[in-house]
Amino acid sequence: MQIKPSYIQNGIVFFAPPPLDNPSFSNIDSYNSQISPHTSYSNTHFPLEGMDMLYLAEKVHFWHRSRVEFIYQQVSKQLVRLYGKEHFKQQYILDVGAGTGSVTRYFLSQGFEDMALGEIHSQGLEYAKTYGISKLFCMDLLDVPFEDEFDCIFAFDVIEHIENDKEAIINMKKMLKNNAKSLLCVSVPAHQWLWNAHDVLVHHKRRYTKGKLMNLFKECGLYIEMAQYFFVALTPLLFARALLSPAKKAQKLSKEALRDVPPPKILNSALLGLCRLENALLPLLPFGMPFGGSLLLVARKV
């Protein structure tokens, strides 16, 4: 159910305030008077420059490709368990904080039928159009426009950008349908000892351990279905980056440092193969691994 005012422009449903240079919205004052005071285009959690670079990288870079494959593998397993093989692709899913929509695009390519994309940056939503994604919401997780609406919500590499991550989780829970099958799926960067200049540049607030993230979700009244580290094989490389490019160097780096430039083709292919091998092996480990570069958690509304 929609609970916030909205307007539509160029196929995008805006719940966040309209851009200041938007002459086509004729009733801005009336619209703004209905908006929560902490929802604004200045309240963004990811650098705008990053959207252009993200769009260029996500189809090629080994990290983006292996990440979405691991997420699909694990999330699909949970949906099949709850809804069965015949119906798991028919659930209404919101991919929020979705950037340019690469995860949504991948799930749609695998036969998922009913997906919406939510993002505070309209620039990311414009890119999502090029993937053929039609349900596009410009929205803020700190002032959500729905309640009791979705069967499943994705928030992959999102809550680490938000100062009040607990509020964002509670708001996502609010948007889930009120039944025991509704899922909230998130991924986050792992381990504070991997904190580096790139974390600062992309406006991360923190990195997480499995225990910390699980406790946070339990405090929000969610039941943990699974939590698993991934990018285990990359952890030594990420630790080296933390040593060679610590957070204190962030101010000396240019905006070009935001660019996820793939490594040389041979190395990119080798790392993609390594990560895919890991993706195949991780489900065989009953207790997972005690570390990794990222962390995936799936929780259920109770």
Image (tube, grey):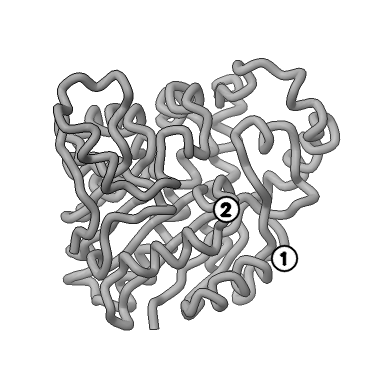
Image-quadrant location for residue 204: top right
Residue 3 position, x and y percent, is 22, 59
Residue occupying image coordinates x 54% and y 31%: 269
In this image, 149 relative to 286: left or right? left
- Residue 182 lies, with reference to residue 26, above or below; the image says below
In the image as oriented, which residue stretches furthest toward the right? 243
Identify the residue shown where x is 71% and y is 59%.
291
Residue 71 falls in image quadrant = bottom left
Which residue is label 2 attached to? Answer: 188
Query: In the rendering, which numbered label is found on residue 116?
Result: none
Q: Which of 242 and 96 is in front in this view?
A: 96
**Side of 9 relative to 143 (left or right):** left
Q: Dot 2 lies on which element?
A: strand
Give the alpha-carbon distance from disc 2 to disc 1, as whole Å: 15 Å
> Mark 1 — residue?
290
Q: Can the viewer see residue 289?
A: yes
Question: Could you tell me which residue is drawn at 24 percent across and 45 percent down?
Answer: 109
Front residue (pair 1, 265): 1
Q: Position of residue 215 (x, y in %)?
A: 62, 74
